[in-house]
Image (spheres, helix red, strand yellow):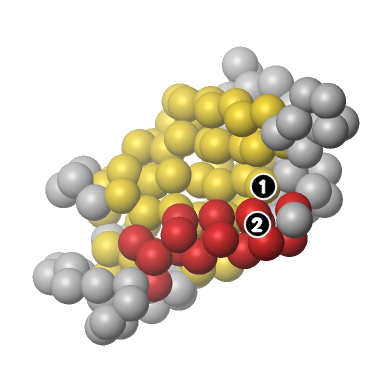
Amino acid sequence: MRTINRLVLTFCLGLPVFGCTDRKGGYEGPTVDAFHGKVTHNGNPVKFEENDEVLLSLYHEKGQQFGIPLKADGTFEIGWMPIGKYAIMLERIAQTPVKKGPQKTMYNVPDRLTIEEGKRDYVIELGKNFKP
């Protein structure tokens, strides 16, 4: 059941990034083709539980929203994205014992992300108030 939930969540949240008709989902403007990166806390890599579903929700300065799924080791790889500045929210669904069920937490990342032409490697610092 967890696998099905994870696949559905990844598919639904990935639609804004990958689109379902054309490569840029109708976006007009400069983009990058692909990039990768990781999230850190106080400069150290962040690790998540294997069963957790973790997503960076990015909000572009022109109003579009994109979702980037994170791997358990805090890294990510993504296809095209518009160039520009983004506000970031970290969303995490932690799988807990069956009695409690999944616990969703959201964290507003204090720094912005700027996607730049030609840059392919990014580090997103979660800030001092992040609680792993």
Q: Quadrant of the N terminus?
A: bottom right
Q: Are marks 2 and 1 in contact (CB under 8 Å)?
A: yes
Q: Which residue bears the numbered disc 1?
A: 53
The answer, for residue 37, to whether it is visible in the render is no
**The quarter of the displayed image where residue 110 is located:** top left
Give the residue type that dot 2 points to.
Answer: Arg
Is residue 87 shown above or below 79?
above
User: To which residue does mark 2 refer?
Assistant: 6
Q: Is residue 71 above or below residue 117?
A: above
Residue at position x 84%, y 33% in the image: 98
Quarter of image, res 14: bottom left
Residue beneath the point at 57% across and 67% down: 77
Residue 111's spot in the image, x, y percent? 44, 31
Indicate left or right for 50 with 55 as reference.
right
Foreground mark, 2 or 1?
A: 2
- View extreme (top): residue: 129
At a point 13% along the width and 70% down the height, the residue shown is 28
Binning the other alpha carbons within 10 Å of mark 2 as few (below 14), some (14 to 19) or many (20 upward) gives some
- Which numbered tag is attached to residue 1? none
Could you tell me the amino acid type at mark 1?
Answer: Glu
Query: What kind of element bears circle 2?
Result: helix
Asked which quadrant contains residue 126, the reply is top right
Q: State the image coordinates of residue 60 (x, y, percent, origin top left).
A: 27, 47
- Say which label, 2 or 1, has the lower sequence index: 2
Q: Is residue 35 visible?
A: yes
- Give how far across and how far down residue 18 sits, in percent: 39, 72
- Relative image position of residue 41 (x, y in whole percent): 68, 32
**Secondary structure category for the residue under label 1:** strand
Locate residue 9 relative to residue 71 in the image: left or right: left
